[in-house]
Amino acid sequence: MTETDTHLSAGPPQSTRLTFHGPLSEQRAGRLVERLARTEPATVLDIGCGWGELMLRVLDAVPGATGVGIDLKAQDLARGRRAAEERGLAGRVEFVEESATGTTRGPADLVLCVGSSQALTALEPPALITDALRALRGLVADGGRVLLGEGFWQRRPTEAELANMWPGASATDHHDLGTLLDLVVEAGFRPEWTETADAGEWEEFESAYQADAEVWLADHPDHPLAAQTRERLDRHRAQWMGYRGILGLAYLTLVPVR
């Protein structure tokens, strides 16, 4: 295959505009890392870690701490390993391609589970979050912390609005924030800190999620992969517009009750 053939067969780049795989600004990330680092965790476990950006920042802020990131996406894990090498953290972190459901890798002093509660359980909503919280309670050491990033309804969506979201979207997919916090307490935690992603963080995340492919598509409208890329981008954008202002994301810093 020639260099030209290779260029033409390549699809759009992925995720190069994303720092975090979620609606998280640099400012909020800095505050989270500072708060979590003050607890001086010796061990960090990142559930559904992706490329583990937040975990790496915690490790950088806590000299001597070690971390394990679990995910099923080999490409994201490879990105995390490269980032760890570049920052001189490779000897203190392990990226593992495995399921987090039923994992025995705890207890850890700090457990990160940001947008990944579904990785901890085979149950579907609405029981999913209760089971995931139970698993998190077993994975965090006494005196430790859990950072949970979890979706919630800012207001209850109508049936018409649900029809414009992801396939099979249901009002039972998420709770409101108050109910989510009640479930946290029932699972054996106290919420040390509660904060939620703002509209700007959502827009930055969703735009960055699509940006590489949108630019590629504009430059390659006749590429063999153009039609499926266009369909995927348009579908995702429509879903985002469907849940924009309705779906929220809470960042909850949780303390296990002894």
Image (tube, helix red, strand yellow):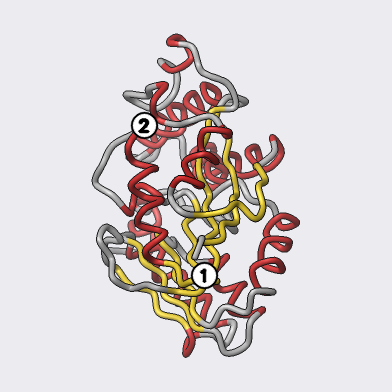
Mark 1: which secondary structure?
strand
Determine whether, in the image, residue 138 is placed left or right of residue 64.
left
Marks 1 and 2: CB-CB under 8 Å? no
Q: Nearer the viewer, residue 18 or 101?
A: 101
Q: Residue furthest front?
A: 258
Query: Which residue lies under the disc numbered 2?
Result: 227
Q: To which quarter of the image does residue 215 belong?
A: top right
Query: Which residue lies under the disc numbered 1?
Result: 110
- Which quadrant holds the N terminus? bottom left
Residue 80's label in the rendered image is none
For the point 52% across and 33% down, the residue is: 179
- What is the three-letter code of the residue carrying label 1? Leu
Residue 19, given in percent of the width and then of the height, sits at 59, 58
Neighbor class of circle 2 (other Cα within 10 Å; few <14, some 14-19, many 20+) is few
For the point 63% across and 79% down, the residue is: 40
Q: Is residue 16 above or below residue 226?
A: below
Closer to the observer: label 1 or label 2? 1
